[in-house]
Amino acid sequence: MSTETYDQQWRTELQATLTHEFEAQTARLTELTADTGDPSEAHTNAALIAATRQSLEQITGALRRLAGGSYGSCEKCGTTIPRERLEILPHARFCVPCQQKHNG
């Protein structure tokens, strides 16, 4: 199998995984936003809703980059993000050095 075929297969599998995760997070958000009527859960639910929305934004961004052909390139310096990083953090937008500067 050529490297290009392998990379395309990996991207196809990644897109399927991200799409599945998007659907799961969307379902979770729907559950969290259902009014339980329990005021003691309001603070916890608000934090969970915020985290789920952030996760959805990250997944959406990764899917958008995959579709647009920019997936795997650092948004700051343009270098290729190592595949190992993308396997661990599929929604990564920056290479490690730029991420460290961004978190500064």
Image: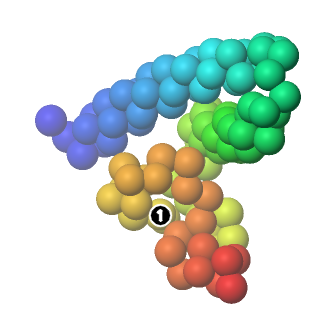
Q: Residues within 10 Å of mark 1 (few under 14, many from 20)?
A: some
Kindly identify the residue that appears in the image at 20 percent across and 40 percent down.
2
Kindly identify the residue that appears in the image at 72 percent across and 40 percent down.
44
Residue 8 position by quadrant: top left
Query: Which x, y percent locates residue 69?
Result: 59, 42
| Display coloring | rainbow
- Along the horizontal axis of the image, is 50 left or right of 60? right
Picture quarter with the C terminus: bottom right
Instruction: Look at mark 1 in the image and give the residue it sits on.
Output: 81
Query: Which x, y percent locates residue 54?
Result: 71, 43
Residue 1 visible to the viewer: yes
Residue 20's place in the image compared with 67, above or below, is above
Residue 40 position by quadrant: top right
Residue 28's place in the image compared with 11, above or below, is above
Between residues 44 and 21, which one lies in front from this camera angle? 44
Between residues 15 and 51, which one lies in front from this camera angle? 51
Kindly identify the residue that appears in the image at 43 percent across and 27 percent down.
17
Residue 72's place in the image compared with 102, above or below, is above
Secondary structure under tag 1 reads: loop
- Along the horizontal axis of the image, is 93 left or right of 46? left
Query: Which x, y percent locates residue 82?
Result: 39, 63
Picture quarter with the N terminus: top left
Residue 98 visible to the viewer: no
- Along the horizontal axis of the image, is 2 left or right of 43? left
- Along the horizontal axis of the image, is 2 left or right of 29? left
Residue 11's place in the image compared with 47, above or below, is above
Query: Which x, y percent locates residue 64?
Result: 67, 36
Number of numbered labels in the structure image: 1
Q: Amino acid at mark 1?
A: Ile
Kindly identify the residue that appears in the image at 48 percent across and 64 percent down.
80
